[in-house]
Image (cartoon, rainbow, N blue to C red):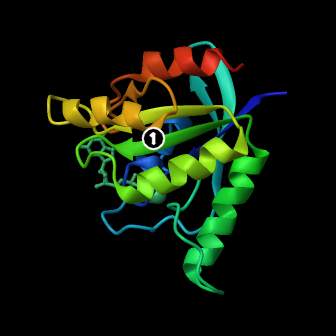
Protein backbone atom coordinates (compact mmCIF):
# COMPACT_ATOMS: atom_id res chain seq x y z
CA UNK A 1 0.00 0.00 0.00
CA UNK A 2 1.05 3.60 -0.49
CA UNK A 3 2.97 5.40 2.20
CA UNK A 4 0.65 7.76 4.11
CA UNK A 5 2.00 11.15 5.17
CA UNK A 6 0.16 13.68 7.35
CA UNK A 7 1.07 17.37 7.18
CA UNK A 8 0.77 18.97 10.60
CA UNK A 9 1.84 22.16 12.32
CA UNK A 10 0.42 25.31 13.82
CA UNK A 11 -1.71 27.61 11.66
CA UNK A 12 -0.11 29.65 8.87
CA UNK A 13 3.18 27.75 8.54
CA UNK A 14 2.36 26.70 4.96
CA UNK A 15 0.78 23.25 5.34
CA UNK A 16 -1.85 23.80 2.65
CA UNK A 17 0.72 25.36 0.32
CA UNK A 18 2.84 22.21 0.66
CA UNK A 19 -0.21 19.99 0.24
CA UNK A 20 -1.18 21.77 -2.97
CA UNK A 21 2.34 21.48 -4.33
CA UNK A 22 2.51 17.77 -3.52
CA UNK A 23 -1.00 17.12 -4.84
CA UNK A 24 -0.23 19.08 -8.00
CA UNK A 25 -3.58 20.80 -7.93
CA UNK A 26 -5.24 23.61 -6.06
CA UNK A 27 -7.44 21.86 -3.55
CA UNK A 28 -6.65 23.17 -0.13
CA UNK A 29 -7.41 26.77 0.65
CA UNK A 30 -4.30 28.83 1.28
CA UNK A 31 -4.95 31.94 3.30
CA UNK A 32 -3.32 34.41 5.62
CA UNK A 33 -6.04 33.68 8.15
CA UNK A 34 -4.75 31.03 10.57
CA UNK A 35 -6.80 27.89 10.84
CA UNK A 36 -8.54 28.21 7.52
CA UNK A 37 -8.30 24.50 6.67
CA UNK A 38 -11.21 23.14 8.63
CA UNK A 39 -11.68 19.80 6.99
CA UNK A 40 -9.12 17.19 6.21
CA UNK A 41 -7.91 17.19 2.63
CA UNK A 42 -6.44 14.09 1.06
CA UNK A 43 -4.67 13.41 -2.23
CA UNK A 44 -2.20 11.12 -3.96
CA UNK A 45 1.09 12.93 -4.28
CA UNK A 46 4.04 12.31 -6.58
CA UNK A 47 7.58 13.34 -5.81
CA UNK A 48 10.22 11.95 -8.13
CA UNK A 49 9.48 8.20 -8.39
CA UNK A 50 7.58 8.10 -5.11
CA UNK A 51 3.79 8.08 -4.97
CA UNK A 52 2.21 8.49 -1.55
CA UNK A 53 -1.03 9.55 0.12
CA UNK A 54 -0.90 12.94 1.76
CA UNK A 55 -3.30 14.56 4.23
CA UNK A 56 -3.55 18.26 4.88
CA UNK A 57 -4.87 19.19 8.30
CA UNK A 58 -6.04 22.21 10.19
CA UNK A 59 -3.43 23.91 12.31
CA UNK A 60 -2.54 22.18 15.54
CA UNK A 61 -4.35 23.97 18.32
CA UNK A 62 -4.81 23.40 21.99
CA UNK A 63 -8.12 21.62 22.44
CA UNK A 64 -10.64 23.60 24.45
CA UNK A 65 -14.08 22.16 25.00
CA UNK A 66 -16.43 21.57 22.13
CA UNK A 67 -14.85 24.30 20.04
CA UNK A 68 -13.65 24.57 16.49
CA UNK A 69 -10.15 24.26 17.94
CA UNK A 70 -11.10 20.98 19.58
CA UNK A 71 -12.43 19.69 16.28
CA UNK A 72 -9.30 20.79 14.46
CA UNK A 73 -7.09 19.19 17.10
CA UNK A 74 -9.04 15.92 16.96
CA UNK A 75 -8.71 15.92 13.18
CA UNK A 76 -4.96 16.35 13.48
CA UNK A 77 -4.71 13.54 16.04
CA UNK A 78 -6.63 11.27 13.68
CA UNK A 79 -4.38 12.20 10.74
CA UNK A 80 -1.28 11.44 12.80
CA UNK A 81 -2.73 8.12 13.95
CA UNK A 82 -3.53 7.16 10.35
CA UNK A 83 -0.13 8.22 9.02
CA UNK A 84 3.05 6.23 8.48
CA UNK A 85 5.08 9.40 8.66
CA UNK A 86 4.34 12.91 9.90
CA UNK A 87 5.46 16.02 8.04
CA UNK A 88 5.79 18.58 10.83
CA UNK A 89 6.07 22.12 9.48
CA UNK A 90 7.42 25.17 11.20
CA UNK A 91 7.84 28.67 9.77
CA UNK A 92 11.60 29.24 9.49
CA UNK A 93 11.03 32.99 9.19
CA UNK A 94 9.12 33.13 12.45
CA UNK A 95 11.54 30.76 14.20
CA UNK A 96 10.49 28.09 16.69
CA UNK A 97 7.48 29.29 18.71
CA UNK A 98 6.17 27.94 22.04
CA UNK A 99 3.30 26.30 20.14
CA UNK A 100 5.80 24.56 17.85
CA UNK A 101 7.63 23.25 20.94
CA UNK A 102 4.41 22.08 22.55
CA UNK A 103 3.36 20.09 19.52
CA UNK A 104 6.87 18.91 18.78
CA UNK A 105 6.74 17.24 22.19
CA UNK A 106 3.30 15.80 21.50
CA UNK A 107 4.53 14.36 18.21
CA UNK A 108 7.61 12.86 19.85
CA UNK A 109 5.31 11.12 22.33
CA UNK A 110 3.38 9.43 19.47
CA UNK A 111 6.59 7.63 18.43
CA UNK A 112 5.62 8.14 14.80
CA UNK A 113 8.43 8.95 12.40
CA UNK A 114 8.53 12.73 12.04
CA UNK A 115 10.12 14.68 9.21
CA UNK A 116 10.76 18.20 10.47
CA UNK A 117 10.26 20.78 7.72
CA UNK A 118 11.47 24.35 8.17
CA UNK A 119 9.26 26.08 5.61
CA UNK A 120 9.48 29.60 4.14
CA UNK A 121 13.24 29.07 3.94
CA UNK A 122 13.73 30.64 0.52
CA UNK A 123 16.38 33.32 0.45
CA UNK A 124 18.27 34.01 3.66
CA UNK A 125 15.40 35.07 5.92
CA UNK A 126 14.88 31.51 7.13
CA UNK A 127 18.47 30.57 7.97
CA UNK A 128 18.30 31.30 11.70
CA UNK A 129 14.97 29.48 11.95
CA UNK A 130 16.36 26.39 10.22
CA UNK A 131 19.21 26.23 12.75
CA UNK A 132 16.82 26.86 15.64
CA UNK A 133 14.69 23.94 14.46
CA UNK A 134 17.38 21.48 15.62
CA UNK A 135 16.42 22.40 19.19
CA UNK A 136 13.05 20.64 18.74
CA UNK A 137 14.87 17.34 19.13
CA UNK A 138 13.28 15.85 16.03
CA UNK A 139 16.46 15.40 14.07
CA UNK A 140 17.83 17.34 11.16
CA UNK A 141 15.32 19.84 9.77
CA UNK A 142 14.70 19.92 6.03
CA UNK A 143 14.82 23.52 4.77
CA UNK A 144 11.87 23.98 2.45
CA UNK A 145 10.02 26.59 0.48
CA UNK A 146 6.61 25.13 -0.28
CA UNK A 147 5.69 28.29 -2.14
CA UNK A 148 8.75 28.30 -4.40
CA UNK A 149 9.26 24.53 -4.59
CA UNK A 150 12.68 24.56 -2.96
CA UNK A 151 13.93 21.64 -0.87
CA UNK A 152 11.60 19.12 -2.47
CA UNK A 153 14.45 16.71 -3.30
CA UNK A 154 15.53 16.76 0.35
CA UNK A 155 11.92 16.07 1.33
CA UNK A 156 11.86 13.15 -1.12
CA UNK A 157 15.08 11.74 0.40
CA UNK A 158 13.58 11.97 3.88
CA UNK A 159 10.36 10.26 2.70
CA UNK A 160 12.28 7.48 0.95
CA UNK A 161 13.91 6.65 4.28
CA UNK A 162 10.41 5.68 5.48
CA UNK A 163 8.96 4.17 2.29
P1 LIG B 1 -1.43 26.69 6.73
O1 LIG B 1 -2.32 27.49 7.63
O2 LIG B 1 -0.32 26.04 7.52
O3 LIG B 1 -2.15 25.74 5.85
O4 LIG B 1 -0.66 27.77 5.79
P2 LIG B 1 -0.99 28.21 4.28
O5 LIG B 1 -0.54 27.17 3.32
O6 LIG B 1 -2.41 28.62 4.22
O7 LIG B 1 0.00 29.45 4.12
C1 LIG B 1 -0.02 30.53 5.03
C2 LIG B 1 0.72 31.69 4.42
O8 LIG B 1 2.10 31.38 4.27
C3 LIG B 1 0.22 32.07 3.02
O9 LIG B 1 0.24 33.48 2.90
C4 LIG B 1 1.24 31.41 2.11
O10 LIG B 1 1.33 32.08 0.87
C5 LIG B 1 2.52 31.58 2.92
N1 LIG B 1 3.56 30.59 2.58
C6 LIG B 1 3.40 29.25 2.43
N2 LIG B 1 4.57 28.67 2.06
C7 LIG B 1 5.48 29.65 1.99
C8 LIG B 1 6.88 29.68 1.65
O11 LIG B 1 7.52 28.68 1.32
N3 LIG B 1 7.49 30.91 1.70
C9 LIG B 1 6.82 32.04 2.05
N4 LIG B 1 7.52 33.18 2.08
N5 LIG B 1 5.51 32.05 2.35
C10 LIG B 1 4.84 30.88 2.32
MG1 LIG C 1 -4.15 25.20 5.76
What residue is rendered at 70% in x and 37% in y?
A: 112
Q: Residues within 10 Å of mark 1 (few under 14, many from 20)?
A: many
Instruction: Find the residue positioned furthest to the left.
Output: 124
Could you say where residue 90 lies in the image, as x and y percent from the top left? 39, 45
Q: Nearer the viewer, residue 132 or 10?
A: 132
Residue sitting at x 62%, y 42%? 108
Task: Judge from the rendering whether residue 133 lies leftward or rightward of residue 54; answer left or right.
Answer: left
- Does the rendering let one see residue 55? no
Give residue 7's position: percent from left, percent from top: 56, 45
Tally of numbered tags: 1
**Percent position of residue 135, x then y:** 39, 35
Residue drawn at (69%, 48%) of the image: 80
User: Under 8 Å from ligand 1: the CB of mark 1?
Assistant: yes
Residue at disc 1, secondary structure: helix
- Residue reaching furthest to the right: 1
Q: Residue 151 in the image: x percent, y percent?
A: 37, 22
Quarter of the view holding residue 2: top right
- Is residue 110 visible in the rendered image? The answer is yes
Between 85 and 102, the one lying in front of the other is 102
Residue ID at (67%, 24%): 51
Q: Quadrant of the C terminus?
A: top right
Image quarter where the N terminus lies is: top right
Q: Is residue 76 above or below residue 43?
A: below
Q: Which residue is mark 1?
A: 18
Q: Determine whether 58 is above or below 124 in the image.
A: below
Amino acid sequence: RLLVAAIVGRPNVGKSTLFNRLAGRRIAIVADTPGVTRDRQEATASLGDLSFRVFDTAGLEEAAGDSTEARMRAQTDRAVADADVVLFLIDARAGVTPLDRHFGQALRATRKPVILLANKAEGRAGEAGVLEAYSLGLGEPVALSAEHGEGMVDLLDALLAHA
